[in-house]
Each structure stands twice: as structure tokens, then as C-alpha cells.
Image: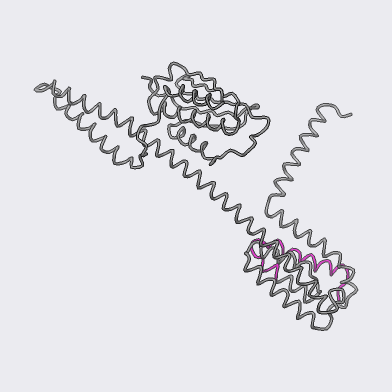
Amino acid sequence: MLDLPAAQALRQATAAGRRLAGRWARAPRAQDALTALSCLALMSLDVPGLAEADNSLNGPLAALVLACGAASLLLRRTAPWVAYAVALGLIGWLHELTLAQFALYSLARYRGRLAGTLGVIGYVAFAYVMFTLPGWPVHRGDSLSSFLSLVVPIGVLAAGVGVAANRQDLVRALQVQRAETSTLHAVQQERSRIARDVHDFVGRELTLLSVRSQVLARRATGGTFEDGFEELSETARSAHRMLNEIIVGRGVDGAPTPGIDALPGLVERSERAGTPVDLLVDGAAHRLSPIRQAAVHRVVQECLTNAAKHAPGGRVDVRVQVVGGHLHVNVRNALPAVGPASSPVSAGTGTAGMSERIHTLGGTFAAGPCQGAYAVLATLPAGDLA
């Protein structure tokens, strides 16, 4: 029996081999090489017959020719017409139909339905011409009906499967593009909300600064600091105007994002919906700037929504702490043993929105499974506490 270190090393080596094989199998070049080898293996079944036929080829030379033909499939993604031309050449010289199947599939998959249709027509027409010439082997069809029943299904089936694969590729590419677009849209929306919050919070402070400066200027009328207070008031008004001009993507829903004080309301709504929440908020968090409180509210709100979608009924732990000049938002919920009966409706962009808001404030954001739970951890500078 293997000892414990040897068994563990064997398991690690096996796992590493599986990961390497998985990556290798997903690599396009590896798939092309495997396709070429599969085609060569099928064509090699004809080597004895080719060596006996009247084509001046012996066994090794026939195998070499077929290997060169199969190697053309290495170009099936970038130049499928090359493999198609080589396949027609083998039909005319050796009456070999196997490579044509792979070539027609590749042509239809990587060049689309029109190319596949033209390829099938050209293949059938060329094969028919070769059939009418002397030397066509009997096992490839000794009558027109047997010839057509062999050649036509090969081409049509191969091209049809290629067209179906081409459509699947287009669907997958569209899904990837749609997901990227949704993520970018979510990021842009979050930036708009951040801009709205900055406008509301900072604009309010600038307005108060301008008003207070005017009051102080009137109190200092005739004094040394009158001009300075007037200049300060004008600077505040100018900064407010610039803020209005720069931030043009304000939301239309009016009020800015709520802050720490609104978290109990979020918890209450979640518990009414069947998701128990354990909320712990440091007292210092209430003295954060409004823009940071808005970020906390945004993260907690999205996390509670995701927990209700993907782990309904599970307890959610929410921790908001200010430690060493940094604000930490930690939200965890246990991963469900069994997923929901029906897939939750989700655009999949909430995480991107949370990440964008935290990164905008100079923080870090991480989300994912961790020790049997789904954890979201956001850390950002606490800034000056009120």
C-alpha cells in the first residue's frame, strides 16, 4: 500500500494531468491536430487497397500521401478552402472520400452556410466527373444510383453538421458579447449613480460654504477680511457651477443613494421576504462621509438581493467596520446545498456595479465562494470621520 505522502503526490499529479489535458483539449490548435489525426486514422484503413490499386503507390508512400492530406486540416480554421482543394485532389488521384467529409465540415463551420453549400455542389460535381472517367473503383459505386447514394449523403451530412456548429458558434459569440455589453452598461449606470451622489453631496456642501462665506463677508463689512470672504464665496459658487457642468449623467430618480441609517430598513425588507439577516455596524461608520455611506448601502443592498435570488431562506451576515483608517464591508451567506427550483432572473451585472463603485473610491473589491459560503468583501479608505 502506498504511504500517505506518495498517495497525496499521486493524487496531485493526477489532478494536474487532468487540468493540463482539459486545457489542451480546449486549445484550438490541439483540436485541429486531433481532427487531422482522426482523419488520418480513418484514411489509413484504405492503405492496403491503395497499394494494390493501379496508382503506382506502395504502402509507405500511400501512407505518406494520406498523412500530407490530413495535415491540411491544420489550416481548417484559417484556410478551409486549402483542405477542401486537397480533398478534391485526393478524390481525383486516389478516389479517397474521407478527407472530403472533414473538409466540407470545416468549410461550413468556419465560413458559413453559403460556403458549405458551394463546397457540396463543387464536391458532388467533381466526384461525378471522376465517376464518368475510366478507373473509378467499384467499391465507390458501380452504378450511378449507388454512386449518388454514397457521395451525396457524405457531402450533405458533413456540411449540414458544419452549418449547425457554425450557428452554435455565432450564438455563443452573441451571448458573450451580450454579457460584456450588460456588464459595461451596469458599470456605466453605476458611474452615473456615483456622479449623481457626488453632485448631490458635494454640491450641497459647496452651497453651504457659499452661503456661510456671504454671511461672514457681511459681518466683516469694512474689516480686513471682507474681500477674502467675498472671494471665498465666489470660489464656492464657481466650483458648484463647474460641478454642474462636468456631471451631466445625473439620475432622474431624484434623491441620492441612502446611507448607513437606511441599512436597518434593508434588513427589515429582506427578513419579510424570508431572508434572515444578522447586521453589525460600527458606531464609527455613522460618521463616514455621505459618499462612503452610499457605497456601503449599495454593496449591502446588492448582496441581500443576490442572497435572496441564489440562496433563498439562508442567513446573511453583514459586517460594517472601521478599523485602522479603513472601512470594511463583509457580507457572507451559506451556499445552498440544492439550488433554487427555477433559475433566478438576473442580469449578472450587480457584482460589476458594486466593484465599480468601490474602485471609484480607491478601494478593493472581492466576491466569490469561500469556505462553504459566498463572501463579498469591500475595503476602502475611511477618510475623515465627521
Quadrant (top left/top right/bottom left/bottom right) for the N terminus: top right
The spot of residue 312 in percent (x, y) is 60, 29
In the image, what residue occupies the spot 63% across and 38% down?
342
The spot of residue 379 in percent (x, y) is 49, 27
Q: Main secondary structure of the magenta part?
A: helix
Query: What's the magenta region?
Result: 55-84
In the image, what residue occupies the spot 76% across and 76% down?
127
The spot of residue 384 in percent (x, y) is 38, 22
Q: Is residue 189 left or right of residue 24?
A: left
Number of numbered discs on residues = 0
Q: Is residue 305 left or right of residue 105?
A: left
The spot of residue 52 in percent (x, y) is 91, 73
- Nearer to us in this view, 274 or 303: 274
- Nearer to us in this view, 115 or 60: 115
Residue 68 located within the stretch drawn in magenta:
yes
In the image, what residue occupies the spot 29% across and 32% down?
203
Residue at the extreme left of the image, as rendered = 222
